[in-house]
Image (spheres, grey):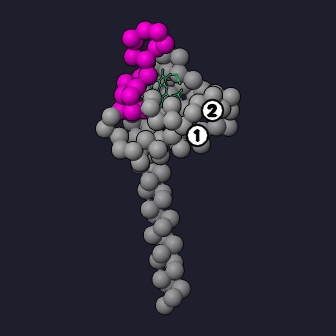
Amino acid sequence: MKKLLLIALATFVAGAVSVRAADVKAIWDKECAKCHGAEGKGDTKMGQKLKAKDYTDAKVQAEMKDADMVKAIKDGVKEKGTDKTLMKAFPDLTDDEVKALVKHIRAMKK
Ligand code: HEC
């Protein structure tokens, strides 16, 4: 009986974690990948046009701060010195979703 309970619990925990990971990936694929690429390389047509960085590059990752990443996702990104929007803001994402997206991007480092 105890063993069964443990298995049930382990399955439940694993299930909860993978649903979250799948959620983040779904958001990424739907909202972010068209510029940043499925793997974060920024090698899409839009990404190249807007000069999205390669998030698989350890150097690029090292230059980004978590707080700036959160801000970029919530407030959007403008071209330096101009008013041109490079990336629109995503104000509808919850704090947890934004945090999970930052983690998702961090995990792209090769
Ligand atoms: C219209 C194209 C576009 C879309 C869609 C887009 N981005 Fe961006 N994003 C950019 C560009 C361009 C930059 C600036 C260059 C760079 O850092 O790659 C940027 C920058 C960022 C940064 C870097 C901030 C820093 O500190 O340098 C993060 C993090 C980010 N985007 C996350 C996301 C997430 C998460 C989504 C989806 C919810 C998303 N982006 C959707 C184009 C886009």
Q: Which residues are magenta?
A: 73-90
Task: Give the left or right position of residue 106, taking residue 83 as reference.
Answer: right
Instruction: Indicate the position of residue 14 as horizontal and vertical percent values.
Output: 50, 65
**Residue shown at the point (68%, 28%) measured from the top left:** 59
Residue 1 lies, with reference to residue 100, above or below; the image says below
Badge 2: residue crowd in 10 Å (few <14, some 14–19, many ≥20): some
Instruction: Looking at the picture, tell me which residue is in the foreground, 63 or 100.
Output: 63
Q: Position of residue 106 (x, y in %)?
A: 58, 40
Q: Which badge, 2 or 1, comes first in the chain's sequence? A: 2
Contact flag, marks 2 and 1 (Cβ < 8 Å):
yes
Residue assigned mark 2: 61
Task: Specify the amino acid type for callout 2.
Answer: Gln
Q: Which residue position holds label 1?
A: 106
Q: Amino acid at mark 1?
A: Arg
Q: Give the percent coordinates (x, y) of residue 86.
A: 43, 18
Asked if residue 57 shows in the view, the reply is no
Whether residue 109 is in magenta: the answer is no
Q: Position of residue 4 (x, y in %)?
A: 49, 84
Q: Is residue 75 left or right of residue 18?
A: left
Q: Is residue 79 magenta?
A: yes
Neighbours of disc 1 within 10 Å: few (<14), some (14-19), many (20+): some
Q: Is residue 63 left or right of residue 91?
A: right
**Residue at mark 1: C-beta within 8 A of ligand 1:** no
